[in-house]
Image (cartoon, coloured by chain):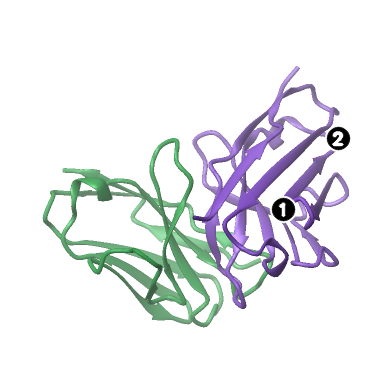
Amino acid sequence: EVVMTQSPATLSVSPGERATLSCRASQSVSSSLAWFQQKPGQAPRLLIYGASTRATGIPARFSGSGSGTDFTLTISSLQSEDFAVYYCQQYNNWPQFTFGGGTKVEIK
Amino acid sequence: EVQLVESGGGLVQPGGSLRLSCVVSGFTFSSCAMSWVRQAPGKGLEWVSSISGSGGSPYYADSVKGRFTISRDNSKNTLYLQMNNLRVDDTAVYSCAKGAFADFYLDYWGQGTLVTVSS
């Protein structure tokens, strides 16, 4: 099983600041990495797939980078609606998807 | 607009059974693999099961293999998850998720249905 590790568990950021979230895979997943945003009581929303491609309708302030085992999600200027939990997920080993434990982005 | 709506959750005793359904709209159901993902209270996301667009290839997490069965009815645009011999640690919100066309990532999710296994 590919283990996905996200850091930090919680990130405190002020609105307008930049947020950088990390995700590490226990073995290479190539570029088969997605990022999701989840708000309380809501379904996860796809932000990024292929490690760096924004999904339809996702604002340009969200960007993804990395390949192999190390990945980053950057939110360039946090808006109030961006405070949520973010999950990375590998799909290189389809269909045995594995998810990271999540990073909660909270208001500082 | 893509929509996925789950139903069938509820309270069940250990050893009991439940059948979850996921009705979809807004895309060609038979062209997309579908998955079930669960989230235990206060925990992260765990993949449960996936099935190909034709329904011929089911896959399961080790934690549910032999107890859960995924299926689909492409004529009804509906995905199912039959859960037998339920355990307390199966308690979670179960969500269905759509596989991207001609790719393997999950692009749309339902809100989920809560399954509580308790005596």
Q: Quadrant of residue B74?
A: bottom right
Q: How far apart, in angstroms, are the residues tagged by discs 2 and 1?
A: 27 Å
Report the chain holding disc 1.
B
Mark 1, secondary structure of its residue: loop
Residue indicated by mark 1: B77
Measuring 77% from the left and 46% from the top, which residue is drawn there? B80
Up-down: is A47 above or below A93? above
| Pointer 2 local density, CA inside 10 Å: few below 14, some 14–19, many at least 20 | some
Q: Residue furthest top?
A: B119
On residue B85, which mark appears? 2
- The x and y percentages for residue A69 are 47, 77
> In the rendered picture, chain A carries what hue?
green
Q: Amino acid at mark 2?
A: Asn
Q: Which chain is purple?
A: B
Q: Amino acid at mark 1?
A: Asn
Measuring 62% from the left and 78% from the top, which residue is drawn there? B102
Task: Give whichever of discs 2 and 1 has the lower sequence position.
Answer: 1
- The x and y percentages for residue A92 are 60, 75
Measuring 52% from the left and 82% from the top, which residue is drawn there? A30
Q: Quadrant of residue B21?
A: top right
The one of A57 and B104 positioned closer to us in this rendering: A57
| Pointer 1 local density, CA inside 10 Å: few below 14, some 14–19, many at least 20 | some
- The x and y percentages for residue B94 are 63, 41
Q: How many marks?
A: 2
Q: Quadrant of the C terminus of chain B?
A: top right
On residue A2, which mark appears? none
Measuring 68% from the left and 61% from the top, which residue is drawn there? B29
Up-down: is B51 above or below B78? below
In this rendering, position of residue A85 left or right of residue B48: left
The one of B101 and B47 positioned closer to us in this rendering: B101
- The x and y percentages for residue B72 are 79, 54
